[in-house]
Amino acid sequence: MSAHEFSFVLELSSEPPTPMLLQDLAARMLDFVGCRPKQATKSVGALRAAVEQIGAASGPSRLAFNATGGSLTITLAAGDHPEWRITQPIT
């Protein structure tokens, strides 16, 4: 089990998610918890695709990180789009 167990949430009240901000934050979180570089790159790429799909969603958006039980789950919710999520093991 990872030594890093935490939850972190970024909520933006009305602006659409900024792709570079979200990607940079995700990359730093994945590095912090010890995710392997290839897995981290895959997760950040998947997040980038999700942000592009969501586009300029109106209303609040939320990016959440939950590290527990040896994995990190990243969740993105924006506007009325379905919630997106990915889980990566922490080594």
Image (cartoon, rainbow, N blue to C red):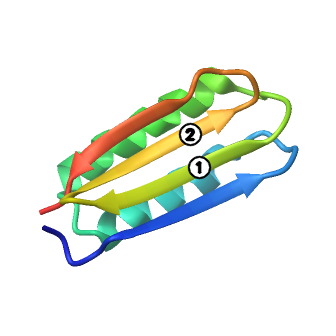
Q: Which residue is mark 2?
A: 76
Counting residues from the start of the chain, the first of labels 1 and 2 encountered is 1
Q: CA distance from mark 1 to mark 2?
A: 5 Å
Towards the viewer: 83 or 18: 83
Q: Which residue is mark 1?
A: 63
Badge 2 amino acid: Leu
- Residue in the picture at 33% in, 73% down: 32
In the displayed structure, does residue 77 sit left or right of residue 3?
Answer: right
Towards the viewer: 49 or 79: 79
- Residue in the picture at 34% in, 61% down: 67
- Residue in the picture at 56% in, 29% down: 83
Q: Position of residue 64 (x, y in %)?
A: 53, 52
Q: Secondary structure at mark 2?
A: strand
The vertical placement of 86 against 30, above or below, is above
Classed neighbour count for the residue bearing mark 2: other residues with Cα under 10 Å, few (<14), some (14–19), many (≥20): many
In the displayed structure, does residue 71 sit left or right of residue 9?
Answer: left
Q: Position of residue 49 (x, y in %)?
A: 49, 28
